[in-house]
Image (cartoon, rainbow, N blue to C red):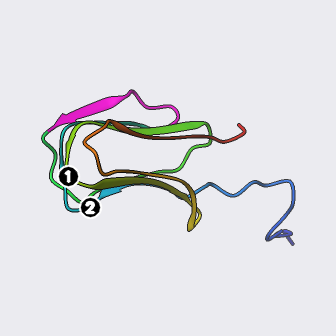
Amino acid sequence: MGLLLVGSAGCAAVPDIRVVVEGSGTTDRLTYSFPGDEERTLRNPDLPFERVGAREGRVLIRAEGVHGELTCKIIINGREVRSATSTTGAALACDHSMAV
């Protein structure tokens, strides 16, 4: 008979990573990246914006040319680990690194 181990400490769970940009404003340029993926830039993206990833490493989201109020968030396994809000039109960035 085979043995099935569930919840073993030697087996790390894959993280559930979400990057979010929301608010009443707009942005001219939105850049984001997940570990193992190339950085992507969107021009005049539809908001709210959300993407998901599942690898450990550095996560980044940046908004430039912000008009109005926007907030960026990085949420890992349901817990918000980074957040920033721009109300002045300044560039906005959230960045978080996880151990690999």
Query: Of helix, strand and loop, which mostly describes the magenta segment?
Result: loop
Q: Is residue 82 visible?
A: yes
User: What is the crowding at mark 2: few (fewer than 14 residues within 10 Å), some, or many (at least 20)?
Assistant: some
x then y, percent, for residue 26: 17, 49
x then y, percent, for residue 81: 59, 55
In the image, 35 versus 21, the foreground residue is: 21
Secondary structure under tag 1 reads: loop
Q: Quadrant of residue 25?
A: bottom left
Residue that numbered label 1 is attached to: 68
Span of residues in magenta:
34-43
User: What is the crowding at mark 1: few (fewer than 14 residues within 10 Å), some, or many (at least 20)?
Assistant: some
Which of the labelled discs sits on residue 23, or is there none? 2
Check if residue 37 falls in the magenta segment: yes
Q: Which residue appears at 32% of the width and 35% of the height?
A: 91
Left or right: where does residue 60 sit relative to residue 48? right
Left or right: where does residue 4 sit relative to residue 34? right
Q: Quadrant of residue 27?
A: top left
Q: Which residue appears at 25% of the width and 42% of the height?
A: 89
Q: CA distance from mark 1 to mark 2?
A: 8 Å
Q: Answer above or below: position of 99 versus 81.
A: above
Left or right: where does residue 20 sit relative to residue 66? right
Classify the position of the N terminus by image quarter: bottom right
Q: Which residue appears at 59% of the width and 64% of the height?
A: 77
| Amino acid type assigned to the residue bearing label 2 in the image | Gly
* Residue furthest front as drawn: 88
Classify the position of the C terminus by image quarter: top right
Q: Are marks 1 and 2 in contact (CB under 8 Å)?
A: yes
In the image, 76 versus 84, the foreground residue is: 84
Check if residue 18 falls in the magenta segment: no
